[in-house]
Image: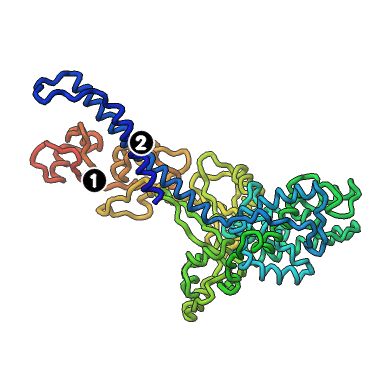
Amino acid sequence: MFRVFSLFVFIIITTGCTTSAIKEEAAPVDEVSVSISDYTELDSLYILVDSLTQNQEFMLDKIDSLENELSYYSSIPLVDKDFQIPRKYKFAGYDIDLNNDRVFEKFERIFKAELRAAQRYIPLTGEYFPFFEKVLVSYGIPEDLKYLAVAESYLNPNATSFAKAAGIWQFMPKTGKEYGLKQTDYIDERRDVYKSTDAAAKLLRDNHNELLKEGLDDWLLAMCAYNAGMGNVRKDVREQGAKSFFNMIMRVEETDYYVYRAIAIKMIVQYQKEIFGKTFELNKPFEEMYKPVTLTSKGYHEIKEWSKAQGTTVAEVFEINPWIKISKHKRTKYSPLNKVIIPPGTFNILIPINSVPDETLLAKVNSSMLKKSSSPTDVYIVKKGDSLGKIAKKHRMTISDLRKYNKLKSDNIIPGQKLFISKTAALNASENGSSNNGKAEPDTTKAQQQSPAVPDSIITSGSDFHIVQPGEYLTKIAEQYKLSVEMLKSANNLKNSEIYPGQKLLVKITNFTYKVKRGDNLNKIAEKFGTTIQKIKTDNNLNSDELAVGQKLVINN
């Protein structure tokens, strides 16, 4: 209705504009001649019509935009402006007094800010709070500290801060590692709701124990230490001689706000009906939607088949386990392949609660998971300009370890060579009998892609080839085997003279196929390959000297 009304108003306005623009009197009916000025007026009218059409499209777009905004704001629950923030409130066993005007003003500002996202985080409390409460109680921590997770991430396991804190409890990388949360190319346990909640409870308990040593039994300060670090809180306490959170000024304002935010969020959740005039529908507890299953892996394995055996899909497993990463595997020509790989370890993986496993397939897959295998990221392929020093620094290891893992007798390495950059990969390779044994083992993948295969008509053996070494070039190799460069290029289907260390070149050439190029003739080709015109004609059943560009000739050496 709003759109129709707006369009009606617009037509009235534009019609008025059009009427006012045409002020010329109509020409008499019997007038036959048409002047140049008449054409000019007609052009002006066409331009005006085009302009009005564009304005109409713009107005319709604007109406769409306003309707979308109206729809969005209609979905936001209205706040009762008459709601009064309690001046006294309980949080984590503390009676919080908000009668001080300065304290109240700060709290009121934070409270109003947290109202904006309430419709997002209140439903999620149903999904996570039952589990949080069980864990916190088991560590002797007040249940109210569950609101800390809301203040940290709004209960989003995928949340990442600008400072690289991650997960529902927002662990920094270093703190996460200190509390046993693994962070690799394949997993980030800071996003694992089970492990991160347990780690958060331990950290809060440890903070509280440290404060007890200072004579302070204050869980709000333990929360501050969770955000700012125990060292900073201890320093503030000693400098100010404070006895509780409310009679000290935190060094960093963010830390101060952080506690007030948790209190404000609890108040919003508790008084949601009074504030919004309704209670939000809560999500089901995640433990009622998913079930944890144990997976033990002794290598780096994809979990596509494992997911299928559990009666679900790898996409669903990835979606409900945000701690599992997508592993991107490089390809030389196309975009990377996405794989979901689990590293060595024992993991609790969530799957839909109604999933029915295929026990036969599962037994087979679980058995394959116990095979040792190296991580794809544990192998580094040497690039041009690399040195052992550069590679060791890049992977935060010593040159000595790099030599030891790869059984290198010197620091000499060549582009394309594969190097193990972890002890695990080196041990696995040694067990499988595929270690470097002190020799450079160039990766010929790139060379093979650059150089098409030798024609099938040529019969070869291992000694018929030359492996390109660092510093070698085509002319040098041609001289070594008493061949011409053109013969080498043609026999190996090389488009130019570029070759790479580790590339395999056919050098025992009895015959090969040559493709005629623009400007070629039989005389030139015969001279190029040290043969005769007659021999080329005989070998190729040619009746004349005429050649076509792209024609293939067999050249017998």
In the rendered view, tell whether residue 58 sits above or below residue 34: below
State the image coordinates of residue 94 (x, y, percent, origin top left). 82, 61
Instruction: For mark 2, give the secondary structure.
Output: helix
Residue 228 position in % (x across, y down)? 76, 50
Residue 476 placed where, x, y %? 40, 37
Farthest residue to the top: give it: 36
**Quadrant housing residue 486:** top left
Report the colour scheme.
rainbow
Q: Quadrant of residue 540?
A: top left
Relative vertical location of residue 523 with respect to residue 407 in this rendering, above or below: above
Q: Is residue 203 visible?
A: yes
Q: Return the residue at label 1.
A: 513
Are there few (<14), some (14-19), or many (20+) residues within 10 Å of tag 2? few
Place of residue 490 in the rendered image (x, y in percent of width and height, measured from the top left) = 28, 42
Q: Look at mark 2 in the image and give the residue it sits on.
A: 13
55 vs 315, nearest the viewer? 55
Residue 365 disc label: none
Instruction: Judge left or right: residue 235 versus residue 286.
Output: right
Point 75% across, 47% down: residue: 106
Quarter of the picture containing the C terminus is: top left
Hey, what amino acid is under mark 1? Answer: Thr
| Disc 2 residue type (three-letter) | Ile
Residue ID at (47%, 81%)? 360
